[in-house]
């Protein structure tokens, strides 16, 4: 169920092409929990990359981990100003 919800979120992000091409989380990196597993924290940090392909790969990889702590960062990528 959890993985399905993350995959739906990622599909929504892909549907909004501007999100896929340009979006980065709009919340501060300072809010990344310090107690995240290293693999999850690395992927969340990659969501802030200037490379859109790296951001996309990180978002997809988060669906395969325990993504609950990453959900706010993924959702914040949907913010289009």
Image (tube, grey):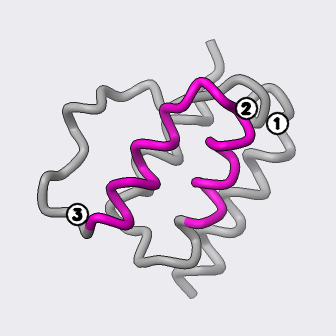
Query: Which of the 4 quarters of the picture holds residue 70?
Result: bottom left
Residue sitting at 74 percent across and 41 percent down? 53
Using residue 77 as the reference point, say whether residue 10 is left or right of it.
right
Q: Residue furthest bottom?
A: 1
Residue 16 is covered by the magenta coloring: no
Lower sequence index among marks 2 and 3: 2
Lower sequence index among marks 3 and 1: 1
Picture coordinates of residue 52, whole percent (x, y): 71, 33
Q: CA distance from mark 1 to mark 2?
A: 5 Å
User: Which numbered dot is residue 19?
Assistant: 2
Q: Closest to the observer: 19 or 51?
A: 51
Q: CA distance from mark 2 to mark 3?
A: 25 Å
Number of numbered discs: 3
Residue topped by disc 1: 16
Picture coordinates of residue 47, whole percent (x, y): 52, 41
How packed is label 2: few (under 14 Cα within 10 Å), some, or many (20 or more)? some
Residue sitting at 69 percent across and 47 percent down? 56
Residue 41 is covered by the magenta coloring: yes
Label 3 SS: loop
How packed is label 3: few (under 14 Cα within 10 Å), some, or many (20 or more)? few
Evaluate if marks 1 and 2 touch, with contact meaning CB atoms under 8 Å apart. Answer: yes
Quadrant for the C terminus, please. Answer: top right
Q: Residue furthest left?
A: 35
Using residue 28 as the reference point, say whether residue 11 is left or right of it.
right
Magenta extent:
38-61
Query: Which of the 4 quarters of the picture holds residue 17?
Result: top right
Q: Closest to the observer: 53 or 9?
A: 53
Residue topped by disc 3: 36
Identify whether 35 is placed above or below 46: below
């Amino acid at each position: 169920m959890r993985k399905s919800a993350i995959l739906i979120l990622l599909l929504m992000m892909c549907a909004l092409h501007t999100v896929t091409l340009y979006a980065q989380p709009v919340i501060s990196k300072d809010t990344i929990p310090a107690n995240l597993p290293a693999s999850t924290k690395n992927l969340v940090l990659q969501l802030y990359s200037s490379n859109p392909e790296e951001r996309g790969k990180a978002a997809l990889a988060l669906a395969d981990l325990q993504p609950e702590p990453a959900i706010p960062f993924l959702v914040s990528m949907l913010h289009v100003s």
